[in-house]
Image (cartoon, rainbow, N blue to C red):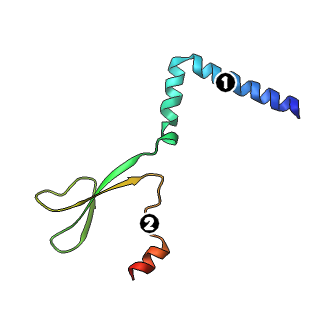
Amino acid sequence: MKKAIIIISAVLAGIILYIWQDPQLSKKVLHQTEDLVTPDTTTVYKWTDKNGNPVLSNSPPAGNIPYETIEYHRDTNVMPSNEEKKRKN
């Protein structure tokens, strides 16, 4: 069992060293994995239109309409929970 762990560790260390030594490959690996490290955020603008309907958009409303800016993280659940639904009712 110890031999298997040593062999696997050596192979992983070799792969890491290979990637680290090759600048092009290193950049490619970092670019492909940066989504895993840094979650994307999206800015959403929320306001009420002249009919009283809520509006969500990726750009602010035209004119002098008051709006709210909301930052959504792609790894966050944006659906209201049952508890939040119960509180609103």
Relative to 10, 67 lies left or right: left
State the residue at coordinates (38%, 54%).
Answer: 72
Frontmost residue, 16 versus 25? 16
Which amino acid type corresponds to the residue marked 2 in the rendered image? Met
Relative image position of residue 18 (x, y in whole percent): 63, 19
Relative to 35, 64 lies left or right: left
Relative image position of residue 26 (x, y in whole percent): 53, 23
**Mark 1 crowd level (few <14, some 14–19, many ≥20, 10 Å Cα):** few
Tell me whether the residue at label 1 lies in contact with that at label 2, contact meaning CB atoms closer than 8 angstroms: no
Which amino acid type corresponds to the residue marked 1 in the rendered image? Ile
State the residue at coordinates (80%, 27%).
Answer: 7
Q: Secondary structure at mark 2?
A: loop
Q: In the figure, residue 6 lies in which quadrant? A: top right
Q: Residue lying at the far left in this picture: please name it.
A: 63
Is residue 65 placed above or below 21 in the rendered structure? below
Residue that carries the numbered disc 2 in the rendered image = 79
Q: In the figure, residue 13 lies in which quadrant? A: top right
Question: In the image, which disc is placed on residue 15?
Answer: 1
Which of the two discs, 1 and 2, labels the residue nearer the N terminus? 1
Relative image position of residue 21 (x, y in whole percent): 58, 16
Where the N terminus falls, by quadrant? top right
**Mark 2 crowd level (few <14, some 14–19, many ≥20, 10 Å Cα):** few
Q: CA distance from mark 1 to mark 2?
A: 41 Å
Relative image position of residue 49 (x, y in whole percent): 18, 68
Relative to 44, 25 lies left or right: right
Q: In the figure, residue 47 lies in which quadrant? A: bottom left
Q: Secondary structure at mark 1?
A: helix
State the residue at coordinates (53%, 29%).
Answer: 29
Q: How many marks?
A: 2
State the residue at coordinates (44%, 74%).
Answer: 84
Q: Residue lying at the far bottom in this picture: please name it.
A: 89
Question: In the image, which disc is placed on residue 56?
Answer: none
